[in-house]
Amino acid sequence: TPADFGRLSANRVHQLLQKGDIDREELLRQVGRLLGRPPMPAAVAVPGPTAPPTRARPAVGTRPVILAIEDNADNMTLLRAILAERCVLREAGDGEAGLRAARTQRPDLILLDLSLPGLDGLSVVRALRAAPATREIPVIALTARAMPGDRERALDAGCDDYLPKPIEVQRLLEAIDRWIGCEKQSGK
Ligand code: MN
């Protein structure tokens, strides 16, 4: 059942992440197995600025574009495993690259690690909100620090939602679904 799936996934993924030295292939296999799917395809590279211009909300039957801005390779691997078949996943490893990708790709939703090298997540979301082209894109903040006040700071800076790390599969999917209905549109 979906409830079992969520609990199993969250627990297993927690275990894997808490072990620290995750073997990436093993993580992919485990997540893929939990999701009842074959191994995930490789990441979709972010194309250059020749990509198509602004897209509206995803039409029914098309996969929404999600931009993940995350510098931690294991977390990115996990996001890829969870989202690869549900959405078109774009990836950026730091804040500057994330801003560029947001401006050129106009994703339907952004998953934003708040702790990034260089331009940090709060600065990224402020820049997104300051620009008309990216102002309306829903942003879900992700942070491992889970310090008191993190959530408020994220929302004050312009994030729409907030998820603490380690990432829980079911909570992530629910949060995405709240903003763009990713799961429903992919028919999963
Ligand atoms: Mn980080």
Image (cartoon, rainbow, N blue to C red):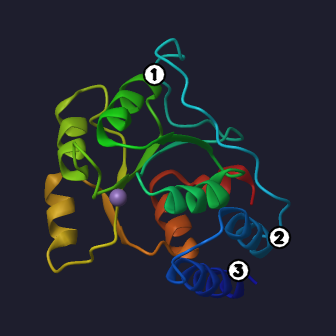
Of residue 58 and residue 171, the one placed in the foreground of this image is: 171
Mark 2 lies within 8 Å of ligand 1 (Cβ measured): no
Disc assigned to residue 5:
none
Q: Splitting the image into 4 quarters, where does residue 151 fall?
A: bottom left
Residue plotted at (75% across, 55% down): 187
Location of mark 3 (residue)? 2
Image side of residue 125 versus residue 71, left or right: left
Question: Label 1, label 3: how many angstroms apart (C-alpha)?
Answer: 34 Å
Name which residue type carries label 1.
Thr
| Residue topped by disc 2 | 36
Query: Is residue 88 toward the left or the right of residue 113 in the image?
Result: right
Residue 188 pos. (x, y %): 74, 60
Q: Nearer the viewer, mark 2 or mark 1?
A: 2
Q: Quadrant of the N terminus?
A: bottom right
Q: With 82 as the anchor, is 101 left or right in this view?
A: left
Helix, strand or loop at mark 1: loop
* SS label for mark 3: helix
Residue 183 in the image: above or below residue 57: below
Q: Where does label 1 land, which residue?
A: 54
